[in-house]
Amino acid sequence: MKAIVLVARGLQLGALGCYGSQWIDTPALDGLAAEGIVFDQHFADNADPLGARRAWRSGRYYLPTPISAAESGPGPDLLTVLREQKIHTCLVIDDSRPSPDDFARGWDEVERVAPAEDISPLEATLEAAGAVLERLEHRNDWLLWIDFATLAPPWDVPEEIQAPYFQEESLEDEDEEDESPEVEPLTPLSQMPAGAIDPDDDTLFLSLQASYAAAVSYLDSGIGTLLQALDGLEGGGDVLLLFTTDAGPNLGEHAAIGPAHARLHEVVVHLPLLVRLPGGAEAGRRIGALTQAVDVAATLADYFRAALPDAHGRSLLPLTRGEIETIRPYACAGLQVGAEIEYALRTPEWSFLLPAQTNTEGEAPPPRLYVKPDDRSEVNDVLQHHLDLAERFERTLRDFVTASCQPGPLQAPPLPETEETPDASLANPVSE
């Protein structure tokens, strides 16, 4: 058994054609989606780079709490159980940008790709990954994990990929009904200015969006090269291939760039997940069940026939084969930025956001409630129309955070029964 996990740090789900983007060129990942299975409702649990990697290794929720929860010794670890099954593990990581060090511990092989003057970080990462694939070609039972940092600034995109996004007509199709006055010519950005953004600064917003789009297309071209190399190897079609990200970045949405605040809006917490089964089985299937980052470890353990004790996540393989339709009634997430903490509870119909702690001694801002999937950008808070539902969501969410801190299997509280249905007319986007 063989598996490859591709991680693109900081990838917005809405940047991919297979998730609805109509202006960013991503043929390789769209092709992977066509050859594999698309998970439409995949969410982070701890929506930051460290939290995501902890979930990928343990299969457990480690939601931030105002008071640090005591841990009862080391938890489950995917690499430990794979080693017991004699599965060879290898990590290739683009070291040109900072990443959590803990994730690189415990692998049989680690290839840290250092920056070089004569080759881009993406090209160097692809070369390292290709060399590892050649070594693994005639070997059985291995996991190769490739971590791309291409989308993390500073952005350095080849001119031929970048130029189309800065032509005057490049963004016209994104909103044909936009009657706002013409903005200044866009300038490619290499850095992402973190913090609050003036919502009326269209030039900065569009320059940021176009610069990020170019970086996504550049990454896609590299992944296309890697997929071609894999298909050219003996047994390349017999590999389980999984593609995902850690968290989506704020790119001016909700008047913020980068991790300015602990906010779990859709753009941050809703993640792409593509899976190509060996032999292309179940190609073209789209899965609407709620899945989370904690499920990645459980899925890989299941694929390699290893037990991951006390994992909170569930294997996604039964979903891919159509054996079951759902694995959880709701998804929960947390994020801490500085002293700020926010939690989120997501169902197919609702998104409930609960600020739990602020950077100041004042009271936390009020919770918010959004109608799903109608209010994709989450700009119209309908909490005042559903106060009782919000109260029950808050109780369930707080109980879930408490349960996730306990040792052993997760005893998740049930979703409160409700006959309330979203009023789509309340979800019409409005200006913030």
Image (cartoon, helix red, strand yellow):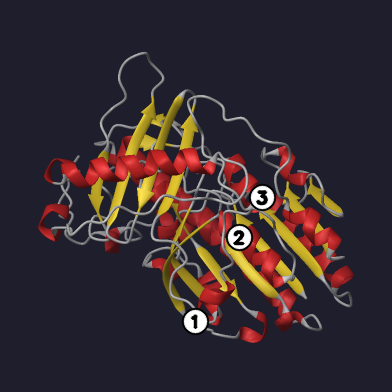
From the viewer's perspective, is 278 left or right of 326?
right
User: Where, quadrant-wise, is the C terminus in this rendering?
Assistant: top left
> On the image, numbered disc 1 is attached to which residue?
322
Q: Earlier in the sequence, mark 3 or mark 1?
A: 3
Q: How many marks?
A: 3
Q: Which amino acid type corresponds to the residue marked 3 in the rendered image? A: Ser
- Seen from the viewer's position, the closer of residues 305 and 369 is 305
| Image location (x, y in percent) of residue 243 | 59, 64
Residue 289, picture quadrant: bottom left
Q: Earlier in the sequence, mark 2 or mark 3?
A: 3
| Image location (x, y in percent) of residue 99 | 67, 40
> On the image, numbered disc 3 is attached to which residue?
58
- Whole-angstrom CA distance, mark 3 to mark 1, is 26 Å
Q: Residue at x 67, y 81 (%)?
A: 278
- Up the image or down, 157 lies above or below 70; here it is below
Element class at badge 1: loop
> On the image, numbered disc 2 is attached to which residue?
296
| Image location (x, y in percent) of residue 387 | 17, 41
Estimate how packed mark 3 is, as few (under 14), some (14 to 19) or many (20 or more) residues with alpha carbons within 10 Å: many
